[in-house]
Image (cartoon, rainbow, N blue to C red):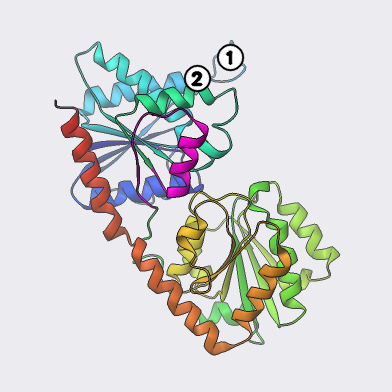
């Protein structure tokens, strides 16, 4: 198949999943064309089956805000026509699904019919999509898609609850490449972070309010009062400065390290003993899955799709959003006993294997075929 993939090229979950899916499809012999405004962060190599088409955004002075949706639609028309794509797969509804619909209508005037699969990732539905400014367009674009997928059953239910959707939504969970995300031998790094064999806790995110990163610092303070420990905060965003200030106020600044954005997340996770994800909302929790694949148990909130990933009492623990006390208590329970910690680590990896790329990729391939066959009728 010749597959066009539209995504955000950033470190966010939707862009990461889209890029890793495209790379895997290319590795399986499909021709994959990425179409976005800059090279995706995870698109770190090219092969004979991988192509990248940049969407050039206009700087015409008439526009206060560049009309990206229209420019993207035009680029999709161009790529579909001249690369003879079989199917478009757009990740994140806003504005990719509506741009794909516009492109599809234009292509029809050339006698070209291109099926569109839209994958819903989370905030395009639970946050931005519910905004009255976007809701009619999101609803229309989803209903006009030839296939629709969601990364968790919770997100599927939320979509039906908040939008008047008539399309069948197929749940295809996020996945993990166990060749990349696995426990690496990083003893020298661990010794540098925890010279006295302290336990290491990790949080990775974009530090937006929805991630509740300050709760991470609060949980760590309670753990640190009981157990010698270190905290690694990976990523960047609006709440980072608040977390830095809070760590100083709680007098744990010497035990907290802010590492900023990192490419080799798996190397950092390889020295971790526990992953913290106290988010207000998570459609799936890809960062938690990456941690589990590196044998790191998870302390998380019980929101969104997290209960579908983090098995309470097995791979970690779930708590209500904002319940810092219980999260800290559960963290200490796992960390205070090395044998117990070891068991949780083994459980985390065993469960992560259920989401291995080799198991999820065939589901996407079969779904593409179903959509293509339905559009031949």
Q: Mark 1 to mark 2: distance in Å?
A: 9 Å
Mark 1 vs 2, N-terminal side: 2
Q: Nearer the viewer, residue 239 or 279?
A: 279
For this view, does 10 lie left or right of residue 131?
A: left
Answer with the quarter of the image where residue 261 lies: bottom right
Q: Is residue 151 magenta?
A: yes
Q: Secondary structure at mark 2?
A: loop
Numbered circle sitting on residue 2: none
Q: Which residue corresponds to the image point at 64% horizontal and 48% vertical from the top-left?
A: 210
- Do tag 1 and tag 2 residues touch (Cβ < 8 Å)? yes
For this view, does 26 lie left or right of residue 101?
A: left
Q: Is residue 190 magenta?
A: no
- Residue 88 visible in the displayed image: yes
Residue to which mark 2 is pinned: 58
Q: Position of residue 178 (x, y in %)?
A: 35, 66
Q: Position of residue 218 (x, y in %)?
A: 75, 65
Q: Secondary structure at mark 1?
A: loop
Quadrant containing the N terminus is top left
Q: Which residue corresponds to the image point at 71% horizontal and 53% vertical from the top-left?
A: 240
Q: Nearer the viewer, residue 75 or 216?
A: 216
Residue to which mark 1 is pinned: 63
For this view, does 303 lie left or right of residue 294?
A: right
Q: Residues within 10 Å of mark 2 (few under 14, many from 20)?
A: few
Quadrant containing the C terminus is top left
Q: Position of residue 204 (x, y in %)?
A: 58, 59
Magenta residues (range): 150-173
């Amino acid at each position: 198949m010749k597959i066009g993939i539209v995504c955000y090229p950033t470190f966010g979950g939707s862009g990461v999943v889209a890029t890793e899916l495209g790379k895997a499809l290319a590795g399986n012999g499909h021709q994959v064309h990425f179409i976005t405004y800059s090279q995706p962060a995870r698109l770190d190599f090219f092969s004979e089956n991988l192509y990248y088409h940049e969407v050039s955004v206009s700087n015409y002075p008439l526009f206060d805000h560049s009309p990206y949706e229209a420019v993207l639609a035009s680029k999709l028309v161009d790529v579909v026509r001249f690369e003879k794509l079989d199917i478009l797969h757009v990740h994140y509804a806003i504005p990719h699904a509506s741009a794909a619909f516009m492109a599809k209508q234009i292509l029809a005037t050339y006698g070209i019919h291109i099926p569109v699969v839209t994958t819903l990732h989370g905030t395009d539905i639970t946050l931005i999509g519910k905004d009255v400014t976007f809701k009619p367009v999101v609803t229309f674009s989803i209903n006009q898609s030839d296939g629709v997928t969601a990364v968790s059953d919770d997100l599927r239910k939320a979509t039906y609850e908040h939008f008047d959707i008539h399309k069948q939504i197929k749940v295809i969970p996020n996945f993990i490449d166990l060749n990349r995300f696995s426990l690496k031998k990083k003893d020298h790094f661990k010794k540098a972070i925890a010279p006295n064999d302290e336990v290491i806790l990790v949080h990775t995110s974009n530090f937006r309010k929805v991630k509740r990163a300050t709760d991470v610092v609060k949980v760590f303070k309670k753990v640190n009062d009981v157990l010698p420990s270190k905290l690694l905060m990976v990523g960047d965003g609006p709440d980072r400065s608040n977390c830095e200030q809070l760590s100083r106020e709680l007098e744990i600044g010497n035990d907290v390290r802010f590492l900023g954005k990192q490419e080799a997340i798996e190397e950092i996770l390889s020295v971790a003993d526990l992953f913290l994800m106290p988010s207000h909302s998570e459609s799936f929790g890809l960062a938690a899955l990456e941690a589990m694949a590196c044998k790191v148990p998870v302390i998380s909130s019980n929101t969104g799709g997290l209960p579908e990933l983090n098995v309470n009492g097995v791979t970690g623990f779930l708590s209500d959003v904002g319940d810092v006390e219980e999260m800290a208590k559960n963290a200490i329970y796992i960390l205070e006993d090395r044998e117990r910690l070891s068991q949780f680590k083994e459980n985390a990896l065993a469960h992560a294997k259920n989401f291995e790329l080799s198991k999820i990729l065939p589901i996407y391939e079969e779904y593409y075929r179903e959509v293509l066959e339905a559009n031949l009728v």
